[in-house]
Image (cartoon, rainbow, N blue to C red):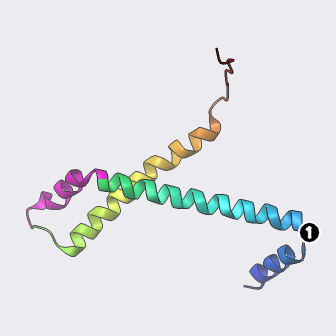
């Protein structure tokens, strides 16, 4: 706990440029997390038939726990699939062709 307080104190006592860099880095990280969660949420909403078939597959009907497990499994699978694709954006070769407009 002291390490975190010391870390935050060092940031508070640092220059304005350093503070600004930490704010930008924290904001970018928070935005990335929120966007990933939002994309996964929308993906689950778009595929309701697939989720319903997974839950009702055992014939016992819908219960809270089975629905919760199926939803958590879908979100986990979606995030596990999306994270590598997200980082591929940064690893791609960046060739840009700029053409003048006619």
Q: Is residue 5 left or right of residue 71?
A: right
Q: Tell me: residue 87, above or below residue 25.
A: above
Residue 97 x, y percent position in the rendering: 67, 20
Q: Residues within 10 Å of mark 1 (few under 14, many from 20)?
A: few
Quarter of the image with the N terminus in it: bottom right
* Residue labelled with disc 1: 15
Q: Residue at x 31, y 56 (%)?
A: 45
Q: Is residue 78 above or below residue 33?
A: above
- Residue lying at 66% horizontally and 58% vertically, measured from the top left: 28
Q: Is residue 49 magenta?
A: yes
Residue 63 location, quadrant = bottom left
Query: Is residue 3 placed above or below 41 in the rendered structure?
Result: below
Can you say which quadrant of the picture contains the C terminus? top right
Compared with 70, 78 (above or below) is above
For image coordinates 47% across by 48% down, the residue present is 82
* Part of the protein shown in magenta: 46-60
Q: Main secondary structure of the magenta part?
A: helix
Q: Of 65 and 8, which appears nearest the observer? A: 8
Q: Locate residue 69, reporting x and y percent.
A: 28, 67
């Amino acid at each position: 706990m002291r390490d975190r307080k010391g870390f935050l104190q060092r940031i508070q006592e640092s220059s304005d440029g350093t503070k600004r860099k930490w704010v930008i880095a924290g904001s970018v990280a928070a935005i990335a997390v929120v966007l990933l969660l939002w994309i996964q949420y929308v993906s689950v909403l778009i595929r309701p038939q697939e989720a319903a078939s997974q839950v009702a597959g055992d014939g016992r009907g819908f219960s809270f726990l089975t629905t919760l497990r199926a939803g958590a499994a879908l979100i986990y699978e979606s995030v596990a699939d999306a994270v590598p694709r997200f980082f591929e954006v940064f690893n791609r070769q960046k060739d840009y062709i700029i053409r003048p407009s006619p």
